[in-house]
Amino acid sequence: MTRDCPAAGYLFSSVRSFFPRQDILTAGLEIYSFLQSKPISHCLSLVDLDQLGKKMQNEVHRKNIISLLAPDEKKFFSTFSYPKRQIEWLGGRIAGKFAALLLLEEEISTDRFASITIMPREDGSPGLKSVLHSDRLPSVSISHSGRFAAGMAANNKVCGVDIQKITDKTQKVVTRFAESDEIRLLAETMPDLNKTQHLSLLWSAKEAIKKALLKDQPVIFQGVLLKDLHFKRFVTLCLQFPGKAPRLAEVNAAIIGEYILAFTVHTNSHA
């Protein structure tokens, strides 16, 4: 196929350039979001963990932020002994719940946040419950890396989101997740990026697929292969994933400063 590779079509210089909406939650906590154009089927949100960590050092702010959690979440939160893990977990829940509230067209308030519970299922993936809604809850996905936690919610679909700080660590484990044909395809179609960016992009895209469609897969990324990619607002990667017969799914991704953000929605996990 003919490929048009815009030099900056999938590059965003800052969080604000990707996430057009900014809201202020309790304690002055900022949260960023992106809603798909109508008809709205999914929402992405982002929390700055550095800011969240600073807010949590103030006792009044800490109390207000924890009030965003449902009772079961508060109990789970209290089991973490390391502050870094506390902030990562808390930021992910806030991001996921905010995305869900936007899709449900609910008021953004402390009470509405506390009415939603996101707790791990048996397979470790986040499961959403609500005391206000039982028949139309979106699916949710959560990720964190470095200074950010990302949340995603999708109506009538399964979803997966992954945020990844771009580092050389992917080059150290490249044989675990990348085939030579995949690396060659990325180098040929995205020559404006370096190898570290290519590998981080591939890892993040496969992670998004795993979260959406392969939650119970015991081996990381086994059978998930990059087959093609094209460019619109984002770079869209077409990946083959295992099942009764090989299937294809698309993952949208963007580079936001020093981070890769990859996300996918799919009709259902058995399609």
Image: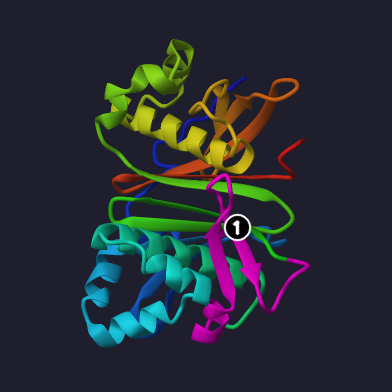
Which of 8/93 is in front?
93
Q: What element does badge 1 sit on?
A: strand
Q: Residue at x 59, y 83 (%)?
A: 107
| Residue 192 spot, x, y in % from top left | 34, 29
Quarter of the figure that contains the N terminus: top right
- Residue at numbered disc 1: 127
Quarter of the figure that contains the C terminus: top right
Left or right? Give the position of 261 relative to 213.
left
Does the stretch in magenta take in 224? Answer: no
| Residue 129 spot, x, y in % from top left | 64, 67
Magenta part of the chain: 108-136
Q: Using the rendered image of the protein, determine whether residue 32 is visible from the camera's viewpoint.
A: no
> Looking at numbered disc 1 in the image, what kind of residue is underneath it?
Gly
Does residue 26 lie above or below 182 as drawn? below
Does residue 15 lie above or below 224 as drawn? below
Does the stretch in magenta take in 110? Answer: yes
